[in-house]
Protein backbone atom coordinates (compact mmCIF):
# COMPACT_ATOMS: atom_id res chain seq x y z
CA UNK A 1 0.00 0.00 0.00
CA UNK A 2 1.15 3.52 -0.69
CA UNK A 3 0.62 6.50 1.62
CA UNK A 4 -2.79 7.20 0.09
CA UNK A 5 -3.98 3.76 1.11
CA UNK A 6 -3.96 2.27 -2.40
CA UNK A 7 -2.51 -1.13 -3.12
CA UNK A 8 -0.86 -2.01 -6.45
CA UNK A 9 -3.97 -3.54 -8.13
CA UNK A 10 -5.95 -0.42 -7.24
CA UNK A 11 -3.27 1.82 -8.72
CA UNK A 12 -3.20 -0.24 -11.92
CA UNK A 13 -7.01 -0.07 -12.08
CA UNK A 14 -6.95 3.71 -11.63
CA UNK A 15 -4.25 4.12 -14.26
CA UNK A 16 -6.25 2.03 -16.72
CA UNK A 17 -9.46 3.90 -15.94
CA UNK A 18 -7.75 7.18 -16.62
CA UNK A 19 -6.44 5.88 -19.96
CA UNK A 20 -2.91 6.73 -19.01
CA UNK A 21 -0.63 5.31 -21.60
CA UNK A 22 2.77 6.80 -20.98
CA UNK A 23 4.95 7.43 -17.99
CA UNK A 24 4.59 11.20 -18.19
CA UNK A 25 0.78 11.00 -18.04
CA UNK A 26 1.02 8.71 -15.02
CA UNK A 27 3.49 11.07 -13.30
CA UNK A 28 1.16 14.02 -13.90
CA UNK A 29 -1.78 12.04 -12.51
CA UNK A 30 0.26 11.06 -9.44
CA UNK A 31 1.26 14.67 -8.78
CA UNK A 32 -2.37 15.81 -9.14
CA UNK A 33 -3.61 13.12 -6.74
CA UNK A 34 -0.86 13.92 -4.21
CA UNK A 35 -1.74 17.61 -4.39
CA UNK A 36 -5.42 16.91 -3.77
CA UNK A 37 -4.40 14.55 -0.96
CA UNK A 38 -2.34 17.35 0.65
CA UNK A 39 -5.24 19.80 0.27
CA UNK A 40 -7.60 17.35 1.97
CA UNK A 41 -5.08 16.83 4.79
CA UNK A 42 -4.77 20.59 5.33
CA UNK A 43 -8.55 20.91 5.38
CA UNK A 44 -8.79 18.10 7.95
CA UNK A 45 -6.16 19.76 10.13
CA UNK A 46 -8.06 23.05 9.94
CA UNK A 47 -11.32 21.34 10.87
CA UNK A 48 -9.70 19.58 13.83
CA UNK A 49 -8.17 22.82 15.09
CA UNK A 50 -11.55 24.55 14.74
CA UNK A 51 -13.28 21.69 16.60
CA UNK A 52 -10.69 21.78 19.39
CA UNK A 53 -11.13 25.53 19.75
CA UNK A 54 -14.87 25.06 20.15
CA UNK A 55 -14.49 22.96 23.29
CA UNK A 56 -16.11 25.03 26.04
CA UNK A 57 -14.34 26.73 28.93
CA UNK A 58 -10.82 25.24 28.90
CA UNK A 59 -10.09 26.48 25.38
CA UNK A 60 -11.06 29.97 26.43
CA UNK A 61 -8.48 30.18 29.18
CA UNK A 62 -5.76 32.71 28.43
CA UNK A 63 -2.27 31.31 27.93
CA UNK A 64 -1.13 32.99 31.15
CA UNK A 65 -3.69 31.01 33.19
CA UNK A 66 -2.78 27.78 31.40
CA UNK A 67 0.87 28.50 32.17
CA UNK A 68 0.12 28.86 35.89
CA UNK A 69 -1.85 25.59 35.86
CA UNK A 70 1.02 23.82 34.09
CA UNK A 71 3.60 25.17 36.54
CA UNK A 72 1.53 23.99 39.53
CA UNK A 73 0.97 20.60 37.91
CA UNK A 74 4.69 20.10 37.32
CA UNK A 75 5.62 21.15 40.85
CA UNK A 76 2.98 18.80 42.30
CA UNK A 77 4.14 15.90 40.13
CA UNK A 78 7.74 16.35 41.28
CA UNK A 79 6.67 15.50 44.84
CA UNK A 80 6.05 11.91 43.83
CA UNK A 81 8.86 9.73 42.52
CA UNK A 82 6.45 7.79 40.32
CA UNK A 83 4.60 10.80 38.92
CA UNK A 84 7.59 12.92 37.93
CA UNK A 85 7.07 12.74 34.17
CA UNK A 86 3.31 12.24 33.92
CA UNK A 87 2.90 15.99 33.48
CA UNK A 88 4.41 15.61 30.00
CA UNK A 89 0.95 14.45 28.90
CA UNK A 90 -0.13 18.09 28.73
CA UNK A 91 2.16 18.54 25.74
CA UNK A 92 0.10 15.96 23.84
CA UNK A 93 -3.35 17.47 24.37
CA UNK A 94 -3.23 19.99 21.54
CA UNK A 95 -0.77 22.23 19.74
CA UNK A 96 -1.72 25.24 21.87
CA UNK A 97 -0.99 23.42 25.12
CA UNK A 98 2.29 22.11 23.71
CA UNK A 99 3.26 25.63 22.66
CA UNK A 100 2.41 27.08 26.10
CA UNK A 101 4.33 24.30 27.91
CA UNK A 102 7.35 24.69 25.65
CA UNK A 103 7.39 28.43 26.28
CA UNK A 104 7.87 27.88 30.03
CA UNK A 105 11.55 27.12 30.69
CA UNK A 106 10.89 26.38 34.37
CA UNK A 107 8.97 23.23 33.40
CA UNK A 108 12.05 21.73 31.77
CA UNK A 109 14.73 22.27 34.45
CA UNK A 110 14.44 18.89 36.20
CA UNK A 111 16.00 16.23 34.00
CA UNK A 112 15.29 12.59 34.82
CA UNK A 113 17.96 9.96 34.23
CA UNK A 114 17.41 7.12 31.82
CA UNK A 115 16.07 9.24 28.98
CA UNK A 116 17.30 9.08 25.43
CA UNK A 117 20.01 11.59 24.58
CA UNK A 118 17.60 13.48 22.31
CA UNK A 119 15.05 13.83 25.10
CA UNK A 120 17.69 15.08 27.53
CA UNK A 121 18.86 17.59 24.92
CA UNK A 122 15.25 18.69 24.36
CA UNK A 123 14.83 19.38 28.10
CA UNK A 124 18.11 21.33 28.11
CA UNK A 125 17.07 23.42 25.10
CA UNK A 126 13.62 24.20 26.49
CA UNK A 127 15.04 25.17 29.90
CA UNK A 128 16.58 28.24 28.20
CA UNK A 129 19.64 28.67 30.40
CA UNK A 130 17.94 28.18 33.79
CA UNK A 131 19.72 26.12 36.47
CA UNK A 132 19.19 22.37 36.09
CA UNK A 133 18.58 19.45 38.43
CA UNK A 134 19.27 15.84 37.50
CA UNK A 135 17.41 13.09 39.34
CA UNK A 136 16.73 9.40 39.19
CA UNK A 137 13.27 8.03 39.78
CA UNK A 138 14.55 4.45 39.81
CA UNK A 139 16.02 2.40 42.61
CA UNK A 140 18.27 0.47 40.22
CA UNK A 141 19.85 3.58 38.72
CA UNK A 142 23.31 1.97 38.47
CA UNK A 143 21.98 -0.75 36.16
CA UNK A 144 19.65 1.55 34.25
CA UNK A 145 21.84 4.60 33.69
CA UNK A 146 23.80 4.68 30.45
CA UNK A 147 26.92 6.82 29.99
CA UNK A 148 25.34 8.35 26.84
CA UNK A 149 22.85 10.10 29.12
CA UNK A 150 25.61 12.41 30.39
CA UNK A 151 26.85 13.58 26.97
CA UNK A 152 24.33 16.44 26.56
CA UNK A 153 24.71 17.30 30.26
CA UNK A 154 28.47 17.64 29.92
CA UNK A 155 27.91 20.72 27.74
CA UNK A 156 25.84 22.45 30.44
CA UNK A 157 27.67 21.23 33.55
CA UNK A 158 27.92 24.80 34.85
CA UNK A 159 24.09 24.97 34.98
CA UNK A 160 23.61 21.79 37.04
CA UNK A 161 22.82 22.72 40.63
CA UNK A 162 21.42 19.46 42.03
CA UNK A 163 22.06 15.82 41.30
CA UNK A 164 20.09 13.04 42.98
CA UNK A 165 20.84 9.51 41.79
Image (tube, helix red, strand yellow):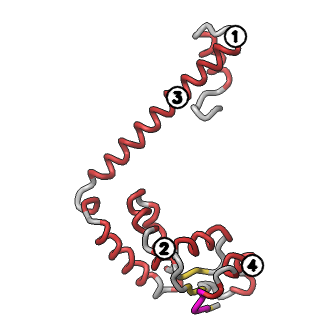
Residue nearest the viewer, comparing 22 with 113: 22
- Between disc 2 and disc 1, the foreground one is 1
- Quadrant for residue 147, please give it: bottom right
Q: Where's the N terminus, which quadrant?
A: top right
Inspect the magenta stretch and tell me whether residue 160 lies in it.
Answer: yes
* Residue 113 x, y percent position in the rendering: 64, 80
Closer to the chain start, of discs 1 and 3, is 1
The residue to which callout 1 is attached is 22
* Element class at badge 1: loop
- As displayed, is residue 136 above or below residue 97? below
Nearer mark to the viewer, of 3 and 2: 3
Q: Which residue is mark 2?
A: 86
> Is tag 2's residue or tag 4's residue first in the polypeptide sequence?
2
State the mark number for residue 146.
Answer: 4
Residue 16 found in image quarter: top right
Q: Quick one: label 4, few (<14), some, or many (20+) residues within 10 Å?
A: some
CA separation in Å, label 2 and label 4: 22 Å
User: What's drawn in magenta, residue-wise?
Assistant: 159-163
- Mark 3: few, some, or many residues within 10 Å (few <14, many ≥20)? few
Mark 2 falls on what kind of element?
helix
Q: Quadrant of residue 146?
A: bottom right
Q: Earlier in the sequence, mark 3 or mark 2?
A: 3
40 in relation to 106, above or below: above
The disc placed on residue 70 is none
The majority secondary structure of the magenta stretch comes to strand
Residue where numbered disc 3 is placed: 35
- Tell me the CA gap for discs 3 and 2: 39 Å
Mark 3 secondary-structure assignment: helix
Amino acid sequence: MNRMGLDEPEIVRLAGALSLSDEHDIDVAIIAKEQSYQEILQELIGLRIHRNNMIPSISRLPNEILAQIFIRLVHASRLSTYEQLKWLGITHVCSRWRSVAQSLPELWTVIPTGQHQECTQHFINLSKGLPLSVFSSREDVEEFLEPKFFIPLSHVADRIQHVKL
